[in-house]
Amino acid sequence: MGDNKVSGTTKTPADFLKSIRGRPVVVKLNSGVDYRGILACLDGYMNIAMEQTEEYVNGQLKNKYGDAFIRGNNVLYISTVNTPLADGA
């Protein structure tokens, strides 16, 4: 009864992070700023490298970066994006 299984398999946070590499994500920082882009890689300290990165402050686009590196101690959460990122067109 105390099983923590869903659909017969157990998925750890590490499994989730591996599965979203190369996909669009939202990274929210402790400061409240959001970065949206493609997750290139991350390490055990939650340092994150992103591509096609957009910076949002209070929900408004403030800047666009090609590649971005975010230090892990600033990260509040990482979330997947269900809709495709804008092309900038």
Image (cartoon, rainbow, N blue to C red):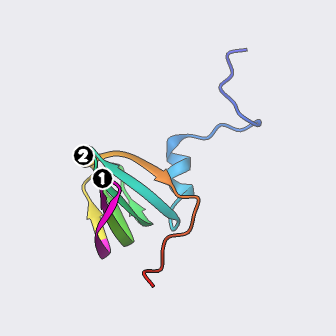
Element type at mark 1? loop
| Front one among 81 and 3 | 81
Residue type highlighted by circle 2: Asn
Q: Residues within 10 Å of mark 2 (few under 14, many from 20)?
A: few
Please identify the residue farthest to the top as the structure is shown. Answer: 1
Q: Which residue is mark 2?
A: 73
Of the residues shown, which amino acid type is indicated by label 1?
Asn
Image location of residue 66, percent across then percent down: 32, 78
Q: Please provide percent x and percent y for residue 10.
A: 65, 37
Q: Residue at x 58, y 58 (%)?
A: 82
Q: Image quadrant of residue 64?
A: bottom left
Disc on the earlier residue, 1 or 2: 1
SS category of the residue bearing label 2: helix
Report how far apart the C-alphas of labels 1 and 2 lie in the structure.
21 Å
Given the current orientation, which residue lies at the most extreme bottom position?
89
| Left or right side of 11 for 62 | left
Task: Indicate yes or no whether the magenta region holds residue 65.
Answer: yes
Above-or-below relation of 61 to 30: below
- What residue is at 50 percent from the left and 46 percent from the top? 14
Residue drawn at 29 percent across, 75 percent down? 65
In the rendered view of the protein, which quadrant contains the C terminus?
A: bottom left
Magenta stretch: includes residue 36 = no
Image quarter where the N terminus lies is top right
- Position in image of residue 68 (x %, y %): 29, 69
Q: Main secondary structure of the magenta part?
A: strand
Residue 12 picture location, percent across and down = 55, 40
Range drawn in magenta? 56-67
16 vs 86: above or below: above
Foreground disc of the pair 1, 2: 1
Q: Which residue is mark 1?
A: 58
